[in-house]
Amino acid sequence: MRPLGIPTMTDRAMQAIYLQALDPVAETTADRNSYGFRKERSCADAICQCFITLAMRRSPQWVLEGDIKACFDRIDHDWLLAHVPLADKDILRMWLKAGYMEKHVLYKTEEGTPQGGIISPVLANLALDGLEAELRTQFPKNRRRSARAMVNLVRYADDFVITGGSKELLENEVKPLVEQFMATRGLELSAEKTLITHITDGFDFLGQNVRKYADGKLITKPSTKNVHAFLENIREVVKVNKQATAGHLVVQLNPKIRGWSLYHRHICAKRTFNLVDHAIFGLLWQWAKRRHPNKGLRWIKRKYFAFAPGEAGGNSWVFFGEVEGSENTRKRVSLYLASQTRIRRHIKIREDVNPYDPAWEDYLVRRHDSARGSSRPAKGSTAPPEDGLPAYSKAYEKHSSAPAPRPQRDVRKA
């Protein structure tokens, strides 16, 4: 993978101008079930499409997990110059061949899209669009054989899955077709990471695990790998801030916890949220004990953990601290709990929506209004305001003076 090449301000401005003309064309010609780097579409839409495709009793049972080897670094320049609908091919050629600087040395770029360029995601989408049409040509829906094949594509940028009625179909017919499609664009599938999986074994896609269980229910959860990576990130933040104040640590952790939990709030993640909260509590409890080795556990609890009202009678173990507020005042901040995040089922965008087509304007306005209307917190939720710096209610004063229960000494590490 080549290093990141940051375009100059002049190049960024030129790319932005050309992008305004190129993006509407890319939207019009894009695959219906492509969701990455496109306006009004998100990872949640891609996961919803997986659910729609695989949830029914007669849905396909096999999934091809596609992994393109170094996609953005290997797209063929000649293919892009021949197929990208830009009238000025010379400027596209200059962007592709601009090279990159590393340690004051200029390196040539003979393949791939410019890393860091704002036009690169659209170029990559243009290169990968057409795969769904190829599959539909080979397996048209109006034929009996295609109905048994149950071939469907869901793609987000260079990550994609293809469903099929049997393992043999995916291995002998679909995979060779995909490999040929990629080869014309200078790309290839990774032999080690491209897998064919049965739906009862489940597969990971965009940080989430999709699996159909023995009772026939399809359940999507945060993937184990994604949870471990998140907790490792949290552990690193806590480790680096051994000498920081509790308030400073809270301010650093809250955006990470909030962002991760909001990403997973559209799936079955409530139990995972509780497990993550427990793991983070263990990290912070060890952090607090290390800072005060000569203090008792009750003293540590009163200093760093307080009551916050909410569901099931509230939570008496919410980590908190203080930061400097306005006019030289001290402001109390509390840790955002992943379990505070309300699960909200995502409403998938329609496949043929084009944000540049005036015919879809009313639909998108209603969709935006509906999304804003559903942003209110759950009844009894302790979710803090948008600034992430909530103040405690009077219930804090009531419970802060109460004797603290003795925590378990064998708090397990996350």
Image: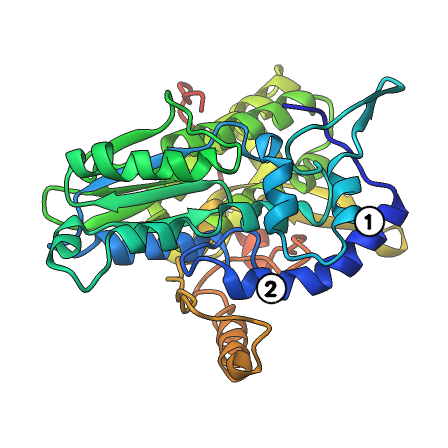
Task: Out of 130 and 120, give the one closest to the viewer.
Answer: 130
Quadrant of the drawing holding the N terminus: top right
Q: Tell me which colouring the rendered structure shows.
A: rainbow
Where the C terminus falls, by quadrant?
A: top left
Q: What element carries label 2?
A: helix
Q: Residue 369 in the image: x percent, y percent?
A: 53, 78
Asked which quadrant contains residue 49, the reply is: bottom left
Residue drawn where x is 46% and y is 60% of the image:
381
Residue 272 at what x, y percent from top left?
37, 40
Name the residue carrying label 1.
12
Which x, y percent locates residue 318? 53, 43
In this rendering, is residue 357 above or below 186? below
Residue ID at (49%, 38%): 403
- Can residue 290 be seen in the rendering of this structure? yes
Any mark on residue 25, and which? Answer: 2
- Taking the spot 59% from the left edge, 57% from the top edge, the residue there is 384
Side (left or right) of 198 relative to 332: left
Tell me what residue is drawn at x 21 percent, y 33 percent. Answer: 172
In the depicted structure, whether residue 10 falls above or below residue 356: above
